[in-house]
């Protein structure tokens, strides 16, 4: 099988490693890719947001499967354009990707499907926004309605900051605050059948102890030793099944990776967000544990054949990823600095490029250091040992990724 992978971040690097490990795969071509992906795949240039260009590249490369990594190409309709050429594509249609592309749309689907989530107000009327803030009370949760790379959300006790963010966004979703640990459940689906991956936890805030502003994600681990044993089953029956069924009912079935972000509250799991693609950095910890060949799985999902697929097989043990971020992230970042240790095994490239063959920083989240081990503590040690081998001037990383779980300090909301 020849596979074209679209994207250039850490998620795509993790996908590339898993795709090349599938014995059915003869070639992986990544566009535009990054220097880390370039060590295992052929790189081609493409404007990932141009559906016609991506479809033409898929034809030119004679691939059997296109895997679209990031959300923006999906929302732009890349999967539709590839499928129109008769090529299998893993990733939802532009219509179905609105589950991520518009928070208000996702809320509407959840309401129609009876999916447990936070109460909310969606709109741009300042008086109604103030009413919603009054009604839900602090901490205030204000979300930009459109795509914002995980950074359009403000969660704050400060009423003025909540109103300022709302005014800056225009159209927003104001939500009731959900209290409890967060879980990401990634589900591979052909629109009908859905196979859950291992639950993971990511770390959105920039600072240790969940302090500072939200980021795209500073680290992750899987599986979750503290999660209720029936968590996946509950989420599949109360969230995933009803959502997929509502999407089919609307004539826009969702096929691809449905990322369910949840808060485990005292009243049970509640959806915080949907994404229409693999999570970043959750993918960096979930895929190293997946024994089932990935390309074959994604091809089955892309061709509506998941019902005939074997149950997923998992390796024993745990995985942890710690993100090394550039100076200034999540604000204005410094880039172009050389990265030492960038090509060590387990280092996933998120925001890198090369200058004269030397890897340099080229984004906010620069690399992810992934460690695996027989348990969470040993996976965590392996990840931090790798962090110590990476050197990038001015970089920062969290020191407490997976720490509370290792120390059994996580309690349900
Ligand atoms: P989102 O882009 O919707 O996932 O939001 C980003 C992050 O903001 C989430 O991962 C949570 O940490 C936080 N967040 C979003 N919505 C809520 C909520 N209703 N209650 C508490 N935290 C939230």
Image: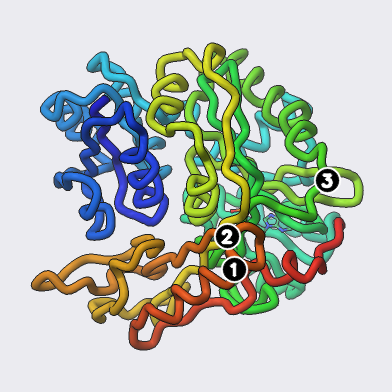
Closer to the N terminus: mark 2 or mark 3? Answer: 3
For ligand 1, tell me if the residue under mark 2 lies within 8 Å: no
Q: Is residue 184 visible?
A: yes
Quarter of the view holding residue 411: bottom right
Quarter of the view holding residue 212: bottom right
> The residue tagged with tag 3: helix, strand or loop?
loop
Q: Closer to the camera, 221 or 144?
A: 221
What is the number of the mark on residue 380?
1
Q: From the viewer's perspective, is 382 left or right of 114?
A: left
Q: Where's residue 189, x and y in %?
A: 54, 25
> The residue tagged with tag 1: helix, strand or loop?
helix
- The local crowd at label 1, few if under 14, some if 14 to 19, many if 20 or more residues have their Cα within 10 Å, is many
Please tell me which residue is depicted at 49% across the width and 43% down the height of the picture.
Answer: 278
Please tell me which residue is depicted at 33% across the width and 64% down the height of the picture.
Answer: 351
Residue pointed to by mark 2: 373
Quarter of the view holding residue 331: bottom left
Q: Closer to the camera, 95 or 286?
A: 286
Q: Closer to the camera, 401 or 173?
A: 401
Please tell me which residue is depicted at 26% across the width and 22% down the height of the picture.
Answer: 64
Check the image and report above or below for 54 versus 162: above
Check the image and report above or below for 174 versus 270: below
For ligand 1, tell me if the residue under mark 3 lies within 8 Å: no
Residue pointed to by mark 3: 228
Give the residue at the far bottom of this rendering.
Answer: 394
Q: Closer to the camera, 240 or 17?
A: 17
């Amino acid at each position: 099988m020849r596979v074209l992978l679209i994207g250039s971040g850490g998620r795509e690097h993790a996908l590339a490693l898993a795709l090349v490990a599938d014995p059915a795969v003869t070639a992986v071509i990544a566009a535009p890719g990054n220097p880390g992906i370039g060590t295992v795949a052929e790189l081609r240039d493409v404007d990932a947001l141009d559906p016609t260009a991506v479809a033409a590249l898929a034809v030119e490369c004679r691939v059997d499967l296109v895997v679209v990594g990031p959300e923006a190409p999906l929302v732009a309709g890349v999967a539709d354009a590839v499928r129109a050429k008769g090529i299998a594509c893993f990733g939802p249609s532009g219509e179905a990707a609105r589950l991520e592309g518009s928070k208000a749309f996702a809320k509407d689907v959840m309401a129609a499907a009876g999916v447990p989530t936070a109460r909310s107000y969606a709109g741009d009327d300042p008086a109604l926004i103030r009413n919603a803030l009054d009604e839900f009370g602090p901490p205030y949760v204000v979300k930009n309605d459109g795509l914002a790379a995980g950074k359009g959300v403000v969660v704050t006790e400060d009423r003025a900051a909540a109103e300022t963010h709302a005014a800056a966004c225009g159209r927003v979703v104001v939500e009731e605050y959900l209290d409890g640990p967060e879980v990401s459940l990634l589900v591979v689906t052909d629109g009908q059948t859905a196979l859950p991956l291992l639950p993971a936890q990511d770390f959105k805030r920039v600072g240790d102890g969940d302090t500072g502003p939200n980021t795209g994600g500073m680290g992750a681990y899987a599986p979750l030793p503290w999660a209720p044993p029936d968590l996946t089953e509950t989420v599949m029956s109360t969230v995933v099944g009803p959502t997929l069924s509502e999407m089919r009912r609307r004539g826009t079935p969702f096929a691809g990776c449905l990322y369910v972000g949840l808060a485990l509250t005292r009243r049970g799991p509640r959806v915080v967000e949907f994404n229409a693609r693999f999570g970043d950095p959750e993918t960096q910890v979930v895929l190293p544990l997946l024994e089932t060949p990935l390309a074959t799985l994604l091809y089955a999902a892309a061709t509506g054949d998941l019902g005939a697929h074997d149950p997923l097989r998992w390796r024993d043990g745990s995985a942890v990823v710690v993100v090394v971020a550039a100076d200034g992230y999540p604000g204005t970042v410094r880039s172009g600095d050389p990265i030492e240790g960038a090509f060590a095994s387990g280092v996933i490239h998120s925001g890198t490029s090369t200058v004269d063959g030397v890897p340099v920083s080229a984004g906010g989240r620069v690399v992810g250091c992934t460690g695996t081990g027989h348990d969470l503590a040993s996976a965590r040690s392996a990840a931090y040992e790798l962090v110590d081998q990476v050197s990038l001037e001015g970089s920062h990383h969290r020191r407490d990724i997976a720490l509370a779980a290792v120390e059994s300090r996580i309690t349900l909301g």
